[in-house]
Amino acid sequence: MTAPSSSASVWETVAKLLFAVGLLGGLFALLNNLGSLVTLLSKLWSRGPKIRAEILDGWFFCPLSSTPGEVLDAEVLLRIGAVNQGLEAVSVQEWAIQVEIERTRYTYPPEIIMPWLVACRPFVAREGFSSRETWKTEWPLKDLRNTSEPYEHGKAVEGWLRFVLPGAEADRIKQHGRICLIAKDALGKEHAVACRKPGEDWTELKILHADRPNDAYELRSMHGPKPPSIQ
């Protein structure tokens, strides 16, 4: 009398297993479809412009005042690397930086880069079997503020932006300020593209003025392009 009951139990177990296998198959199919849907939505979302950038170098300068206690305007020159990760080409209409220090935030638009400014970075010159440490120049400095060409998908762009910070202390901003770069494209979309946190290391960089006699003298011994006035 127990055999029919045992046989029924076996078939019941098999049915449950088949149901479980079917349920798992349906779940995998659903997850696969969801993955395809997410991929499609991601492609559609990234079709629009998406500017990404980073601050590669930074130079901070604040001239000394002859009046005790007076703080003159700081000057910041940033070398920027940018790329459009979206599929749609677009130009950047406006750049700006936001400087946050002691929970206070300031926004500054870029200023013109004068043609006599020359960027200099450390450089090891090879001369036969010997080498010596010197500086390598970059000139002219590409002003991203004046770049109207569209940013094509995946094409990297490098350039410079210069900012004047009224009444700010350059060294204090460099060491303790959070600096965020903002780009606004021609379609009106704002991109917060890069931030430098307080205390981050900056690569060694200096900016020389070719119209100053001392700087012009120093530039003559450096490698790289220079303004025509430097002989």
Image (cartoon, grey):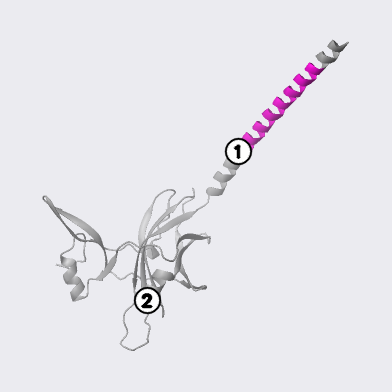
Q: Residues within 10 Å of mark 2 (few under 14, many from 20)?
A: some
Q: Secondary structure at mark 2?
A: strand
**Residue 21 at what x, y percent from top left?**
70, 25
Horizontal relation, residue 167 to residue 23: left or right: left
Q: Is residue 211 above or below residue 224?
A: below
- Looking at the rendered image, the quarter that the N terminus falls into is top right
Residue position for label 2: 74
The residue at the point 39 percent across, 77 percent down is 169
**Residue 113 at what x, y percent from top left?**
33, 69
Distance between the alpha carbons at the discs numbered 2 and 1:
51 Å
Residue position for label 1: 35
Most extreme residue toward the right, as rendered? 1
Q: Is residue 73 magenta?
A: no
Horizontal relation, residue 131 to residue 160: left or right: left
Note whether residue 147 is visible.
yes
Of pointers 2 and 1, the one earlier in the residue sequence: 1
Which residues are the magenta region? 9-34
